[in-house]
Structure formats: C-alpha cells, structure tokens
Amino acid sequence: MSVYASSIGALMGAGSPLSDAKGKVSLLVNVASRCGLTPQYSALQGLQDRFAAQGFTVIGVPCNQFLGQEPGSPEEIHDFCSTTFNVSFPLTEKVDVNGDDAHPLYSTLRSVADGEGYSGDIRWNFEKFVVGRDGSIVARFHPKTQPDAPEVIDAITTALAAQ
C-alpha cells in the first residue's frame, strides 16, 4: 500500500500533507518541540531547502507520546517550529505513533526494518522514514541518526534518482 494513500490532516488548515506529497520523495519524521533531539529541526529544514526543487519534502508528524514532549496546541506547535527553526515543510495533525490509538500510517511504517534490522514500535521522537515517489517505504532510521547523516542523504538521493 502507498503511504500517500493514508489520510492525515494538516496541522493548520485544510488539506493532507501526504496527499500533497504524492509523486515526491518524502522524509516522514515524528517530531516534538520539547525533546533533546528537537535541534534536528534545523537539519530537516536544511534537507527541505536542499532537495525541494528535485521533488522532495520533509513531513513532520507531531506526537506527544514520548514523555509528553509535544504538549502544545496546533497553533503553538506551528509558531514554535516557524519562529525557532524557520520550518517551511508541512506538519501534520498531532497523532499517536504507537499503541491502540496509533494512526494507521504508523501501523504501516512500524512494519519496516531499519538498517540494523529493527522493526516494531517507534522508539522515540525523530524516527525517520524515507518514502519513494510511489509511496513505498525506502528506508527507516533511528531517532538519533541525524537527518543530514550520509546514510539518510544516500537514501534520499537514491529515491530521487529512481523513476
């Protein structure tokens, strides 16, 4: 199933970031504003700036499941991201990524193994998934893997080169 077929609302306003990304390469990341990994927003925005013209987008998925590190309202999350990190990539509505109330998108994402063979529950904020133009999941990366790490860049550029 194509990840882009999943329905998930935008953080602010109407629309669906996944529907809007159909035909692009995406980096899906569950994000949080009060996490030790929150500075990764800078590198995520750097990827957006670097690759957007080639048909790429970062999609941030706010989640409050990890020690309540994304407690804000949609407006607070948007304001924090835009003013603190100049985020221009789309953000989805806040969802659960694990457990009985997990968004269906994450049921699909959790089944994919990362480079170390781990599949299953999302381990923490900022777990990353590269999604191809066709909506297939190309790669999964640990939350502590920096967005601009060579292996993430390689997965993105390989997916961008694929037709």
Image (cartoon, rainbow, N blue to C red):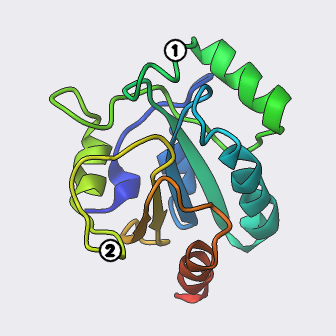
Secondary structure beneath dot 2 equals loop
Rendered-image quadrant of the N terminus:
bottom left
Three-letter code for the amino acid on which mark 2 is drawn: Glu
Residue at point 60%, 25% (across, down): 34
* Residue 149 in the image, given as x and y percentages of width and height: 64, 71
Q: Which residue is mark 2?
A: 116
When the figure is inspected, residue 41 is found, relative to residue 110, above or below; the finding is above
Inter-mark Cα distance, 1 to 2: 31 Å
**Above or below 109: residue 30:** above
Image point 26% across, 65% down: which residue?
118
77 displayed left or right of 87: left
Q: Which residue is denoted by mark 1 in the rendering?
A: 71
Residue at horizontal 36 percent and vertical 57 percent from the top: 3
Occupied quadrant, residue 105? top left
- Front residue of this view, candidates 28 and 126: 126
The quarter of the picture where residue 81 lies is top right
* Image position of 120 with respect to 61: above or below: below
- Which secondary structure, mark 1? loop
Residue 69, percent from left and from top:
51, 23
Residue 90 percent location from the top left of the image: 64, 41
Alpha-carbon neighbours of circle 1 within 10 Å: few (<14), some, or many (≥20)? some
